Image (cartoon, rainbow, N blue to C red):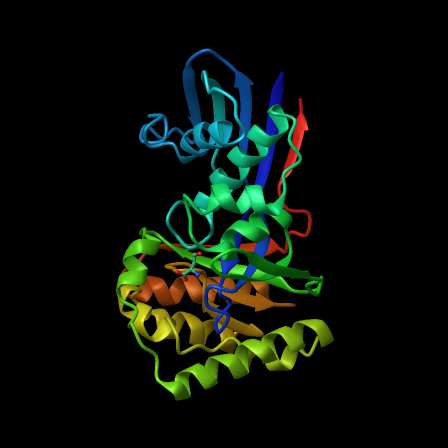
Amino acid sequence: MKIKISVPATTANLGAGFDTFGLALNLFNEFIVEESSSIEIETSPKNDFLENPENNLFVQVLKRSCEYFGNEFHGVKLSQRNNVPVARGLGSSATAIVAAIMVSAFVNKKELTDKDFFNIAYEFEPHPDNLLPAWKGGFTIALKDKENTFYQKLDFPKEIKAVVAIPDFQLSTEEARKVLPEKIPLKDGIFNVQRASLFVSAVITKRFDLLKVAMDDKFHQPYRKKLIPGFDNVIKNALENGALGASLSGAGPTILALATESFDDIGKSMAEAFEKEGVKAEYKVLDINEEGAKIEVI
Ligand code: HSE
């Protein structure tokens, strides 16, 4: 049996919704899997690092998931098509985690419950804001307490697209969390609660004029921007060229703009602001993905 799983890229935070908001994007990593008695990995574009089973997150999560579902792991023949850039704040790790959990549940004929999904997934990535939209698609609001993950998936306006400016350097979430302070002043807490709430209501009521102010943030962007040359100017260019709002994508270094028009003008102007700082960058215009991860026998 040959199984194919496609999992969308995701952008987390969307400004004020730090560790809470996530949005799935129409850019996919694909994992084609066959049973095997050994581990064989082929990647496209070719990536020697990922072809080593010890480094391959999909293989590591698959092993753990098989154990979780009570099945011995013997091996796998994996063909991995990577379209989501790695360590850029677009949820590439979440694609591998979601894909591996879905495959193991499918092969072991288990219905994948939220509880099982998060039990396994959190061993590899502790934040639901990329995991959830990668799995379920759409715009998700999630919180994790000691025992449970509570979440909602909301309709996201179809007329909005994501313009992502992707600089040519990697930044791990771990590195980008190290620069965050332990404590946040109350006024910054208020600033973010107000904006995150406004963002949700703007999405529900399609008040696109509110997105600019609603995507501002004081929890993480002011600290992380020192790791991202040109951050302020990339945001400024996006807004001046027609974006509804702009923010760091996840832990960065990609920057996200939401827009209903002028997509290429926005993307070009964002890439130019990176390039002014000597950082090569490309941009992509992506539809919002509503379906989430898909698994099929091929
Ligand atoms: N919310 C996370 C962060 C992104 O900004 O560090 C990855 O889940």
Q: Quadrant of residue 210?
A: bottom right
The picture places residue 171, in percent across and down from the top left corner, at: 31, 54
**Picture quarter with ligand 1:** bottom left
Q: Image point 48% across, 23% down: which residue?
A: 78
Residue at position x 49%, y 65% in the image: 13
Pick the residue in front: 44 or 205.
205
Q: Which image quarter: residue 227?
A: bottom left
Q: Residue 276: x percent and y percent?
A: 31, 66
Total numbered labels: 0
Q: Is residue 119 above or below residue 149?
A: above
Location of residue 58 by image quarter: top left
At 53% from the left edge and 53% from the top edge, which residue is drawn? 10
Residue 242 in view? no
Q: Nearer the viewer, residue 247 or 36?
A: 36
Q: Outermost residue toward the front?
A: 147
Q: Quadrant where the N terminus lies? A: top right
> Considering only vertical position in the picture, is 157 above or below 30?
below
Q: Which of 247 and 165 lies nearest the eye of the viewer?
A: 247
